[in-house]
Image (spheres, rainbow, N blue to C red):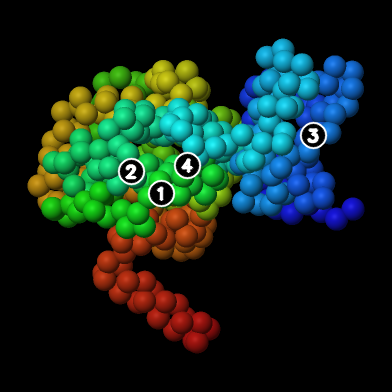
């Protein structure tokens, strides 16, 4: 039997995920029959009789969402106690699985379908939707009553940021609004006239000033901050961030495996999903080795933090520290920016400027991201002095090889 196409695999995986969220683990599947989609219902769901429901939807990759929504509609009808024939009739034979562009747009249903698509495809995690997408979807729902066109909607979305052109929050809100409009049109959930404009720059705006550059903390600053943190749990958390170059969220995903400290955090991005990794101190960081963080690790030594909100909790705590505030003000005066990620940036900076024998790809692996991400994020800190020093070391190495 030939292997299914990639889009078919995505369809079935997404459908299985959506069904499992509604309590259905088996008993309903989809396949192709004479170029159309067909829903297969097991005896358990079909009141003792297997059913095969032909849909009027073409079995094609552009109809992944329509097929999934039609199947879910049938299942929901069955769960609601409708007779099998009624649940099937509500969907089967209707163009585009009951999706219609006539009448008012059901925006909450559109957003819910968008959420299921994002989660079902594995593109994002549920926590990402909750922490990042959900609040921006609420903004869209609050603005749709004032908009009759995509341009009006984008203008309403951008209005609260009128005094902050180009800011990151405004950019993300506009981009996610355009994304759901584009997806809605592509899947037939919205009329074609709701397609967003290709150029979003007028709605995002342009920053009047250059953004402050997030810079790495110096070792002396790290050690001074550790000395001024009075709470032992928060001090331990800050030491872990600084010694291993962790993302703040990763503090809640640490465990000991065979005597080694591991990070089990999985970050999903366009470049894929990160894998669990053992944590490593840089060879140049003797000060970090003296802390014995790995040997003394215990989860209860860390402060309590809500899942997904570790960075917020620690950021709030650090902003209440006098030395942290002084450093932030000094950084800002120099056109730079101090944030928790400055600890992670400092790890990368030390790796490239002090531990020059470490290949970049290994530093990226130790930090838990791809080489492409690493180069994009940290190459801007490689100045002319570092480049000159690297070339000088290479020349010295060549001379040693030639005279050996």
- CA gap, disc 3 and disc 1: 33 Å
Q: Nearer the viewer, residue 299 or 226?
A: 299
Residue 53's tag is 3
Q: 167 above or below 351?
A: above
- CA gap, disc 1 and disc 2: 8 Å
Q: Which residue is mark 1?
A: 193
Dot 1 alpha-carbon crowd within 10 angstroms: few under 14, some 14 to 19, many 20 or more: few
Dot 2 alpha-carbon crowd within 10 angstroms: few under 14, some 14 to 19, many 20 or more: some
Residue 177 x/y as whole percent = 37, 42
* Left or right, residue 72 beside residue 51: left
The tag earlier along the polypeptide, 3 or 2, is 3
The tag earlier along the polypeptide, 4 or 2, is 2
Q: 248 above or below 34?
A: above
Q: Quadrant of residue 220?
A: top left
Residue 149's tag is 2
Verify CB contact (< 8 Å) between mark 1 and mark 2.
Answer: yes
Q: Quadrant of residue 44?
A: top right
Q: Which residue is mark 4?
A: 190
Q: Secondary structure at mark 4?
A: loop
């Amino acid at each position: 039997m030939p292997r299914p196409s990639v889009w078919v695999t995505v369809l079935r995986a997404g459908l299985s995920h959506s069904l499992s969220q509604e309590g259905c683990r088996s008993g309903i599947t989809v396949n192709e029959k004479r170029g159309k989609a067909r829903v297969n219902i097991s005896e358990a769901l079909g009141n003792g009789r297997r059913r095969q429901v032909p849909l009027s939807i073409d079995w094609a990759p552009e109809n992944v969402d329509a097929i999934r929504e039609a199947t879910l509609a049938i299942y929901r009808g069955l769960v609601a106690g409708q007779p099998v024939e009624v649940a099937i009739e509500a969907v089967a034979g209707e163009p585009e699985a009951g999706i219609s562009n006539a009448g008012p747009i059901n925006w909450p249903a559109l957003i819910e379908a968008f959420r299921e698509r994002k989660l079902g495809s594995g593109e994002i995690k549920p926590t990402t939707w909750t922490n990042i997408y959900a609040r921006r979807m609420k903004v869209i729902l609050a603005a749709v009553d004032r908009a009759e066109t995509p341009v009006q909607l984008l203008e309403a979305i951008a209005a609260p940021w009128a005094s902050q052109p180009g800011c990151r929050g405004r950019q993300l809100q506009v981009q996610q609004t355009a994304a759901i409009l584009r997806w809605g049109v592509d899947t037939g959930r919205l009329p074609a006239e709701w397609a967003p404009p290709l150029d979003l720059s007028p709605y995002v705006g342009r920053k009047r000033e250059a953004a402050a550059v997030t810079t790495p903390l110096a070792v002396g600053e790290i050690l001074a901050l550790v000395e001024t943190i009075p709470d032992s749990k928060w001090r331990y958390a800050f030491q872990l961030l600084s010694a291993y170059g962790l993302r703040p969220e990763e503090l809640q995903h640490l465990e000991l495996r065979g005597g080694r400290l591991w990070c089990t955090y999985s970050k999903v991005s366009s470049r894929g999903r990160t894998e669990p990794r053992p944590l490593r101190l840089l060879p140049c960081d003797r000060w970090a080795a003296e802390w014995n963080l790995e040997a003394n690790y215990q989860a209860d030594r860390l402060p309590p933090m809500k899942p997904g909100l570790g960075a917020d909790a620690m950021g709030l705590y650090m902003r209440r520290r006098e030395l942290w505030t002084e450093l932030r003000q000094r950084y800002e005066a120099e056109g730079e920016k101090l944030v928790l990620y400055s600890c992670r940036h400092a790890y990368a900076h030390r790796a490239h400027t002090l531990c020059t024998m470490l290949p970049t790809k290994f530093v990226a692996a130790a930090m838990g991201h791809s080489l492409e991400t690493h180069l994009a994020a940290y190459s801007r800190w490689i100045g002319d002095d570092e480049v000159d020093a690297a070339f000088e070391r290479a020349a010295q190495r060549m001379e040693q090889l030639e005279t050996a």
